[in-house]
Amino acid sequence: MIELFDVTKRFGSETAVDAISLRVEKGEFCALVGSSGCGKSTTLRMINRLIEHSEGEIHLDGQPVRSFNEELLRRRIGYVIQNTGLFPHWTVARNIGLVPRLLKWPRGKIRARTEELLGLLGLPREEFADKYPHQLSGGQAQRVGVARALAADPEILLMDEPFGALDPITREALQRELQDIQARLNKTVVFVTHDMDEALALADRLVVMHQGRIIQQGRPIDLLHDPVDAFVESLLGGLDRGLKEAALTRVSERMAPFGPRLLASERIPYRASLSQALSVMLWHRVERLTVVDDEDIPIGELSLRRLLGAKSS
Amino acid sequence: MLVGLMAWLVLDAVNVTPNRIVSGTPYRAYEVHGWWAALLAGVPMLAVMVLAWRPDVRRLQAALVVVVGLLSAMPLWLATAVAALADPDMPQARLGVGSSLWLLLFLWLLVVIELRTRLGLPRAFGWLLLLPILIGWWLSLSFWLEPLALFREYQVRSEQFASAIVYHLALVGAAVGASLVLGIVLALGMRRYPGMRKAGFSVLNVVQTIPSLALFGLLLAPLAWLSSRFDWLASMGVSGIGWAPAWLALVGYSLLPMVRNTYVALEGVEPAVIESARGMGMSRRQAFLQVRLPLALPVVLEGVRITTVQAIGLTAVAALIGAGGLGTFIFQGLGQAAMDLVLLGALPIIALALVADALLGALAERFRHGGTP
């Protein structure tokens, strides 16, 4: 659990972060969003004391971060940054084993852990363990960056625009993998991004920052329904907000059992989002879709009315 | 190659002198063994030219073999020239190497280097290529080339020569070593105190622009004064002339490239890498020793390379103030108008500089292991 109490950071006379309070529960995925220069990265880096806060208190599991030795504190917190920060003179395996080595794990345990993580991130050990970072693609390098952050099994993961430099396809793949990993490992994650779709897709809690202050926080769906002001509204997509909300809901949540009618000819996987279902309807000019499972077997149907949220079809 | 062929046929290949002072009689290549032999020797050169005309891997490899063969054969040809020109009446006569052979040597070595890079052969292979050439020269020098003027000069001073090389290297090593330590300390200081950076670089820049002889002169007076004041300094051999001012001047000249490279190398490490090192929980020391320093090392070694090559050359000048080393032969030779003695000093200096350059370059490359391309 991470708690910030009235935390302020000043650089000279400039206030980068202005008296913010925030509470991230254990196992929660918290996304900090806002335009650049709003203080979100600074906030993240105050948690692992790469930047020391000027005022207020930051607690980890109820203990102030200043009570820890700063190096020992950071070894307990996974940290991922945008340009990976992998050490170019070390192999992938050595990069991943960095924190365990700092923690003086026995050698065999480090090797086993490295292999486990390479597997977890979908990088076959034989192919990647002995490569150097410059031999990797952007997506692979960032996978290694995530593996390195997870190496010593930290409770907390701090991620500073980790997928910002990747192409959209790779970014989406990595977002999905991060969701899977999060579902399995249940880490407490603080994730900085300026990509609202990314934040909406990943976060349990969305924190919108502007000029060093938190202007709204809560569940993504609540923010979409009830933005406090025009800034939050525009940040959340303005007129596109309906689609963003639809993107948060899965087809399986709205589908209905088969009705008396024939199966609709167009199909949609049950894992797809409502916005994708709407897109399929728009594309084929139809009002009804057949919902299929992973094996492409029909399991239900989705009508436009149900998609829109009406009770009966 | 065409230039080489022309040189071979037109310029003097060797000259024969009855003794050291009198200028010799030049002979062209065809005058030694006759036209046919000279043209025959031209055939491999023509062959290389033809092979290089439409290059592919096979042809370039063949050309490389031919040129290495030529280089190895050159001393053997010299040996036959010695045999042909030897005059039993003048056992003291000496044979100077003429301009065409120097030019050929230079051109062929260039061709070897060019071919090696074009074929993308590894550095170690380059050394392997030099092996037959060196063996050829060494064999001929030890058995057949006694009347060669350069060799005569060497024979007279063989002990002096060995100690001069050792002394030269010791002086260079001491200067480079001292400036490496000082350079790293200064670069670290400059990184911590930005004010020191400006001042430091401008002082070093000024030192760099002082002509070397002037710097030796400037050091003469204060050092002489110091050694007269402090006996322990004098007993160490510190005085206005000799190794002390030479060493000091060498360190002074070496500092700028050393500090600049070290500073740039340390600053040039990507900030994201250092941030992640700190963010992962490395201490400042660990981040410096395990990340910043190894990443900077190739560029630091580049500084050592530049400095060493520069110092090898400068030490030659230091002979003027009695610092010893190979420069002694050069200045003696100049004083006595004996070009071969000058060469006896100059050739090893060039060789030393080239070897140091190659070795340190290879070392820097090794430390780039896997790192940023």
Image (tube, rainbow, N blue to C red):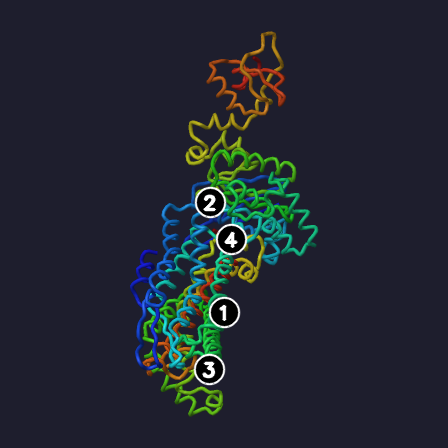
Q: Which mark is residue B160?
A: 3
Q: Earlier in the sequence, mark 1 or mark 4?
A: 1
Residue B303: image location, x then y, percent: 44, 65
Front in this rendered view, residue B105 or B251 = B105
Which quadrant holds residue B22?
bottom left
Q: Which residue is mark 2?
A: A213
Circle 2 residues within 10 Å: few <14, some 14–19, many ≥20:
some
Query: Are tags 4 and 2 found on a single chain?
Result: no
Q: Earlier in the sequence, mark 1 or mark 3?
A: 1
Residue type, mark 2 in image? Arg
The residue drawn where x is 46% and y is 14% is A285
Q: CA distance from mark 3 to mark 2?
A: 79 Å
A93 sits to left or right of A198: right
Circle 1 SS class:
helix
Residue type, mark 3 in image? Gln
Decide: is B58 above or below B268: above
Q: Which residue is mark 4?
A: B371
What chain does mark 4 sit on? Answer: B
Pointer 2 and pointer 1: residues touching (CB < 8 Å)?
A: no
Q: CA distance from mark 2 to mark 1?
A: 83 Å
Residue A37: image location, x then y, percent: 43, 46
Circle 3 SS class:
helix
Front in this rendered view, residue A96 or A231 = A96
Residue type, mark 1 in image? Leu
Mark 3, mark 4: which one is toward the viewer?
Answer: 3
